[in-house]
Image (cartoon, grey):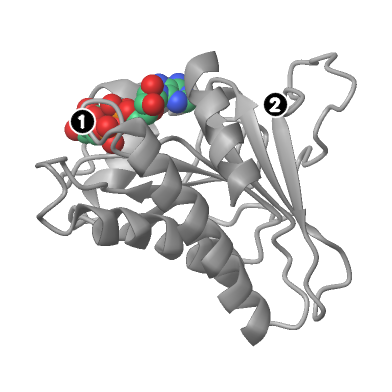
């Protein structure tokens, strides 16, 4: 069982002014609103350039490896900020297969939960990489909806150490998130989930995400 954590977001509001406080989400580089008939309010997709460990959202996604016992890149950053309690908790999760998602509390991070997923290692595209990567995004959205999170932030899963080409990975990410939101909206009349953030570490990555989201 996960320790009790409040479900309301500490600060889901995107800081449109660009003035960043300690717990503010930086102003997005690009946003897209999705209006769905069954939803009272539009869902917002936002491209933000930030360190994901600083985002005060309900849940951040971790691009982990199948041991869930930490590593480099965004995984290492998340464990460093969350503190040793995260590693101790992750030891109880018995690892995670590629394309699956497991949840933990966020401990010292400003988010409430971490959704750990394992993206595919890029082998050239012929080993089901796109489908596995899409499953990471779909699974995280499904968990976020099931737990009534209002905001969720993704890093660019698999595009670092795992070598997935950024443009291809971004196309998978943007399509999988939008398809998942539409699927979930067809099931649940009013989704708690209002904001999905594509959190890019570099300005160059954020530009690619903005282009792909705009074209979608
Ligand atoms: N905030 C947001 N994005 C970040 C941050 C951060 N603090 N740090 C890195 N990124 P990677 P992968 C970006 O390598 O390719 C680990 O060792 C980074 O620029 O973290 O899925 C795991 O344990 C890139 O765009 O994850 C696994 O063994 C993106 O996060 C392996 O790496 C993903 O890069 C997973 O490799």
> Tag 1 or tag 2, which sits nearer the N-term?
2
Picture quarter containing residue 147?
A: bottom right
Please tell me which residue is depicted at 43% across the width and 56% down the height of the picture. 137
Left or right: 101 with respect to 118? right
Counting from the top left corner in percent of width and height, residue 2 is at: 46, 59
Please tell me which residue is depicted at 55% across the width and 32% down the height of the picture. 199
Picture quarter containing residue 36?
A: bottom right
Residue at disc 1, CB closer than 8 Å to ligand 1: yes
Task: Say if 184 sits above or below 10 in the image.
Answer: below
The residue to which callout 1 is attached is 163
Determine whether the residue tagged by mark 2 lies in a helix, strand or loop. Answer: loop
Left or right: 95 with respect to 11? left
Contact, mark 2 vs mark 1 (Cβ under 8 Å): no
Task: Say if 46 sits above or below 189 in the image.
Answer: above
Task: Say if 30 sits above or below 195 in the image.
Answer: above
Please tell me which residue is depicted at 25% across the width and 36% down the height of the picture. 164
Work out which quarter of the rendered image holds the N terminus and state it.
bottom left
- Residue 108 visible from this viewpoint: no
């Amino acid at each position: 069982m996960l320790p009790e954590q409040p479900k309301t977001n500490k600060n889901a509001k995107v800081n449109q002014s660009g003035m960043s406080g300690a717990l503010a989400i930086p102003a997005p580089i690009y946003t897209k609103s999705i209006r769905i008939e069954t939803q009272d309010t539009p869902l917002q997709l936002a491209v933000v350039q930030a360190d994901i460990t600083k985002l005060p959202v309900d849940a951040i996604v971790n691009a982990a490896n199948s041991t869930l016992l930490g590593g480099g890149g965004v995984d290492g950053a998340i464990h460093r900020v969350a503190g040793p309690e995260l590693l101790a908790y992750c030891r109880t999760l018995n690892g995670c297969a590629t394309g699956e998602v497991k949840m933990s509390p966020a401990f010292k991070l400003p988010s409430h939960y971490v959704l750990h997923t394992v993206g595919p290692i890029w082998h050239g595209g012929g080993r089901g990489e796109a489908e596995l990567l899409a499953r990471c995004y779909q699974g995280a959205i499904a968990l976020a909806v099931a737990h009534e999170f209002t905001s969720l932030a993704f890093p660019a899963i698999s595009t670092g150490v795992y070598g997935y080409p950024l443009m291809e990975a971004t196309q998978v990410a943007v399509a999988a998130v939008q398809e998942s939101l539409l699927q979930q909206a067809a099931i649940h009349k009013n989704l708690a989930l209002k904001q999905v953030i594509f959190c890019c570490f570099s300005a160059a990555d954020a530009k690619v995400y903005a282009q792909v989201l705009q074209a979608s």
